[in-house]
Structure formats: C-alpha cells, structure tokens
Image (cartoon, rainbow, N blue to C red):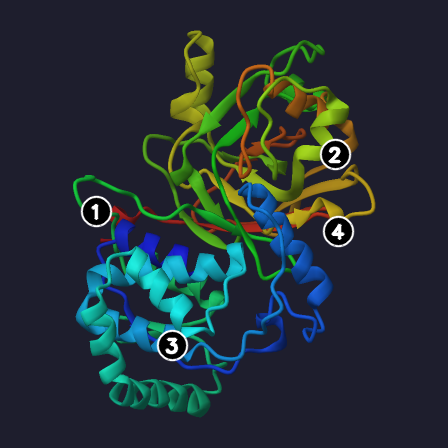
Amino acid sequence: MIVDELFALKRLYRVDIDWCLVKEVPRPSSLPITQQNPRFPYNRQDCERRARWRGLEWSPPEWRLTDVSAATHLGLWLLRNRSELFEAYTVRVSRAYWSHGKNISDAATVEALAREVGVTDGELDAAKAAAAVIERELAGNAAWCDESGVLGVPFFVVDGEKFWGSDRVGALKRYLNEAGYGSALAATDGDVLFNNGPAVTLPVAGREASVAVNRIFCVGRNYSEHAREMGVDPTREAPFFFMKPLDALVPSGAHIPYPLGTSKYEYEMELVVVLGEAISSPVTPEEASRAIFGYAAGLDMTRRDLQLAARDKGRPWELGKAFERSAVLGPIKAAEDLDSDPVGQIVLRVNDDIKQNAKVADMIWSVQEIVSNLSQYYYLRPGDVIFTGTPAGVGPVVVGDKLQGEIADVGRVEAVIVPRIEARV
C-alpha cells in the first residue's frame, strides 16, 4: 500500500520524493507463509485468498523469509543509477511477496524479478559490486531511525521533511495540500501518455493487506427518510446507480479542499461494500453474498446545488457527484471477521454534533439485493466498491468542519474540509 500510494503521489503532485531505504530485520508479521510464524493461520488464509483472486494454484512453500538484503541492495542501486526502473522493480518485488508468496530472501528470485522489468545482467553485476557502499548507506539510514526512535522501515523525504511508514503517508498528503502543491500531468511510461500509475488501494483493518479499488458504484435513495427529504416518494422500485471516478477516492483522515463550482457542499454517510470475487453473470441475492469481501464506512461528498439542478432538468448527476476527492473511505472490515452482516447503527458527526443517526437495517434494498441487481448489468470484478445509500440528515459543510462517521461493527471514516489550494496560493 505504501509503495502504490507514494508513486501515485509523485505523479499527481508537482513534487519529487526521495527514498531512504533501510535494511530491517523482519518482524513476525512480516513472515507471511511459514509454520514458524505465530500469525501463520491468518497469513496463510490471506495469501491463499490473493492467489484465488488471481486464478493461481495455491501451494504454500516451506521457506521462511529471513532478510531482504538482496532486494534492498538492488533497489537502492536502481534508485541511484537507474531511477526509471526503480518504481517498476519496487512494485514487482512487493507484489511478488504479498500476492504471489515468492521468497524475496532469495537473491536468484530477486534477480529474476529485476530482469522482468528490464534490469540487465551487467546492471545486476554492477549492483553486486557496489554492495559494500550500499550497505554503508543503509546502515546510516538505520542509524537515523534508531536515533529518532523510528521503526526501521523505508522512509522518504520531501522538501527536506522526513516521513516514514504507512502511518506517515497521510501526513505527507496533508503536507502536500497545506504547502500548496497542485496536481500535475502524469509522467509518460514508454509510448503510453498520461499514465496515472498504480491502482488506488485501501487497507484491510487488522491485516497487513490492502485492496486495489477497481470501480466505484453508488446507489441512489436507499433510505426512505432520505428520499423524502430529497423531495421524492420512497417506493421499492429497482435501485438505480451512478458512478464516481477513481480520483474521487481518498482514505479516511483526508483533508479535502472545498470543491469548485458549488456553494452547497454536503455530506452523505454510507455503508460501502467491497467485492472480492468476480461475478460474470446475473446472480441471486444469496449467490451475491459469496462475492462480498468486506465492508467500510464511507462519505459520498456531494455538490448538492449542482445535483438538484441536474435532477430538475432530467440530466445526469455527474457534476454533483462524480468529482475528485468526493468518496472518502475508511479501512475495509473483512466479512469473515464479522459475526453477521452489518445492520447496526450508522452515525455521522460534524464538529461533534450528530447529524445522521439511523440503522443499516433501514435500507430499502439490502446489500445482497444491490449486488444482485448490479450483476444484471455489469461484469463485476474484485475491487469493485458500492456505496449503498445514505440515511436522512444530510446537510452542508464549510471550511474547517470535521466529519466523523461510524458504522457499528464496521469501522470509522473521518475528513476535514480545508480551503481550495488556489485560494491558499
């Protein structure tokens, strides 16, 4: 997740991110598929699930991850000498380990992965020859971590500010926003122009795993009282859907600039469903349950004045719904970690004042019915997420407002509304 997000940030902002790699001794949670790992039962299931998603045969190896010297040495050499290959190599190694169970302790495995992204045998030899120099740099980085009380993980530097670990990605995003960095055109990748880079990912609560988001579907008017407050009759006709682009997605805790073109920016607190298996033909609600990987708390941020103007003219809702940073999502709670489907309280507070307070069980269409209906029209894929509608109590926010949402047994989502970047500049 850190790797994906950092490379995405490098593309989406006018900023250079310098990496400082650290040679670390793996913690028990870093040993995904070994009998010696005290977390072996969970990690085995996680790796098996990932293999199944990708259509791979699952046969767990017997090796144990002991260190990552070969992978780290080569990564630092590429960063300093072939930076154009560093991203592809880093992503390949990370996903080979987490998604495919490859032993990145083994130098031959690492070299094979490097060759897949274009590293030559001559470059591999040069990296080996520089191992002593590289080890000194890694040791220096590790010493800085020790002196600063930082766990020995890769850290990164922007404008001389040091950030480290997954908990600091959010801090880096806040820094980029507060420093007035604007989005930039993505770098080119070979003959592909405007490549937006790795997938947007969301963490899975309680696990060292993340989900790459594929598409964002949204259900309209799925709570009776909300339908009435929007001025329409809540009948149980077939649900209707709209979509948001991937750049709408931001993680919980984001600082969201007040968007362009609106004077009535509103929140909608929602239960979000995350699919973990493909659905390639229409399914029943009972069959739909098998494809659900988990749930999350989400905010469907809406330019209400634009949405209602479009609705009154019989036009699509995109201007009101489908814009950047309009889908805030908390960590995903795996369905297998829940005793039952979410039906409990869904609450949103703005500046500690309760604005929305209902039960998920009040939805007109259940989660399974929504997925079933959607399968009549789309080939659904792992990583598709579905916002399932909001209860009554929606309302506007202004700059400085702090939003805190929570769904019983699922989790929380938070966001802060900040001024537009161009206003600060």
Res 315 → quadrant: top left
For the residues labelled 1 and 3, the Cα–Cα distance comes to 26 Å
Q: Is residue 239 left or right of residue 111?
A: right
Residue at 64%, 32% in the rendered image: 393
Label 1 residue SS: loop
Label 2 residue SS: helix
Q: Which mark is residue 337?
A: 4
- Which residue is tagged 3? 70
Label 3 residue SS: helix
Q: Earlier in the sequence, mark 3 or mark 4?
A: 3
- Asked if residue 424 shows in the view, the reply is no
Please name which of the two marks, 2 or 4, marks the residue nearer to the observer: 4
Q: Which mark is residue 84?
A: none
For the residues labelled 2 and 4, the Cα–Cα distance comes to 18 Å
Do labels 1 and 2 touch, CB within 8 Å? no
* Vertical position of residue 198 compared to residue 163: above or below: above
For the residues labelled 1 and 2, the Cα–Cα distance comes to 44 Å
Label 4 residue SS: helix
- Which residue is tagged 2? 360
Q: Position of residue 32 (x, y in %)?
A: 60, 66
For the residues labelled 3 and 2, the Cα–Cα distance comes to 49 Å
- Asked if residue 156 shows in the view, the reply is yes
Q: Earlier in the sequence, mark 1 or mark 4?
A: 1
Please name which of the two marks, 1 or 2, marks the residue nearer to the observer: 1
Q: Position of residue 36 (x, y in %)?
A: 69, 76
Q: Earlier in the sequence, mark 3 or mark 2?
A: 3
- Which residue is tagged 1? 189
Residue at 47%, 74% in the rendered image: 105
